[in-house]
Amino acid sequence: MALGDLEREVMTQLWDAREPLTVRQVHERLSRDRDLAYTTVMTVLDRLAKKGVVTQEKTDRAYRYGPAQTREEMTAALMLDALSATPDRDAALAHFVGQLSPAALAAAIEAAKNSS
Amino acid sequence: MTALLLGAFGLTLSLVVPGVLAGARWADRAPVAAVVLWQAVTLAAVLSALGVVLAAPEELVRAAGSGRPVATAALVGALVIAAVIVIRLLVSLADVSRRSRARRSRHRTLVDLLDRAEQHPELDVEGLRVLDGAVPFAYCLPGRSPRVVLSGGALRVLGPDEVAAVLAHEQAHLRHRHDLVMESFTAFYRAVPRPLRRRTPLDCVHLLLEMVADDAARRRCGAAPLHAALQRLTHAVAGGAAGGGDDDRDRRLDRLGPVDVRSAGITVAVLMAAAAILVLPTVILVVPWLDRAFEAWPL
């Protein structure tokens, strides 16, 4: 299994959990339907913490890991990064229908909310 | 004389030609050639600036009949300024490509973590990522490990044919490395001193590359689904209030009728013009000047 997929699954577990989880808890949840090394889970959590998407806190001798943002917050931030028009059009992304001004983006979010 | 003519040519290329090209609707019928023409115009403007910097001191020194020390100083000064121009362009290019790589890499990390593509097994596409969210949008992340990103909202408003057309459009951007073309124009834009910067080339080339990707998608999926997808996505996003993009969108929609508007004749003519802009000044102005200048080479 690719490391990227595993990172995604670990994130999903952290997002679904109500509270920060220990490595052991994440490992238990992920190994319900497969064979997975404890150290692998530890490595993945460490990588995610380095990327800044997971926060690490120490409580009663054990590290607990939680998502830095909720799934919705992170999705919204990503969408903002993708769609907001920047003064210097940098060439980082290519859009199907162009970028939006903050006002147009807000209107789009509103329109999508109403239609769904 | 050479310096004056090259200067006039360079100023025409940087001040007059972009305005004319920006208004040219024939570009819509030969977008690939039009991108090449923009590249030729930009490169020729840079080369003319270098030509002026090198030729002007030499010609002044010769006209004044100054001695060898003055001629040597003039030549060294000219070479230094020319080197500064070239280095500034290269630094700008390195800077733009470093920044967009960093932004893409961060964006890719997050998009991979948030991906919901497994909920859409019917979309079996390499590098596809689906994001939660009702706002319909589609974009791609170019680079060595590219991604095409669709929102759940886009999948909701688009039919399967339209999704295929959007994916074909984005994959054309990725396959033809349109990001590198945009990066070079961005780098040039940022290297030009602020009061002289013009967004025109950047915006025009951007639109032309969209048309190139539209043509690729049309070849694979036909014009109708692409036309519909473009309409649906722009309409869903702010109901047509998408800022300055309206004209651009209309120009793209106009090209996506039942008849392919592309013209081989225009393509050939534009490519020849691009070659002429690069070659003719060199042959007519620069080569005769080099001939004279090397006879009096002071170093």
Image (cartoon, helix red, strand yellow):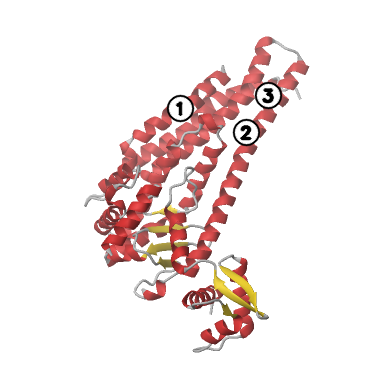
Seen as rendered, the residue at the extreme left is B258
Cα distance between the residues tagged 1 and 3: 32 Å
Residue position for label 3 = B294
**In the image, residue B286 lies at what x, y percent?**
57, 26
**In the image, residue B227 lies at what x, y percent?**
26, 54
What amino acid type is highlighted by mark number 1?
Answer: Leu
Residue B89 relative to residue B266: left or right: right
Cα distance between the residues tagged 1 and 2: 19 Å
In the structure shown, which secondary structural element does the residue marked by tag 2 occupy?
Answer: helix
Q: Which mark is residue B15?
A: 1
Snapshot quadrant of residue A44: bottom right
Seen as rendered, the residue at the extreme front is A60
Tell if the residue under mark 2 belongs to the same chain as the one under mark 3. Answer: yes
**Residues marked 1 and 3 touching at CB (< 8 Å):** no
Residue position for label 2 = B85
**In the image, residue A12 lies at what x, y percent?**
48, 75
In the structure shown, which secondary structural element does the residue marked by tag 3 occupy?
Answer: helix
Q: Earlier along the polypeptide chain: callout 1 or callout 2? A: 1
**Tag 1 subunit:** B
Seen as rendered, the residue at the extreme top is B64
What amino acid type is highlighted by mark number 3?
Answer: Phe
Tell if the residue under mark 1 belongs to the same chain as the one under mark 2. Answer: yes
Q: Residues within 10 Å of mark 2 (few under 14, many from 20)?
A: some
Cα distance between the residues tagged 2 and 3: 22 Å
Tell if the residue under mark 1 belongs to the same chain as the one under mark 3. Answer: yes
Residue B65 relative to residue B219: left or right: right
* Residue at point 26%, 65% (across, down): B159
What amino acid type is highlighted by mark number 2?
Answer: Ile
**Tag 2 subunit:** B
* Residue at point 66%, 19% (across, down): B58
Residue A66 relative to residue B231: left or right: right
Q: Is residue B231 above or below residue B7?
A: below
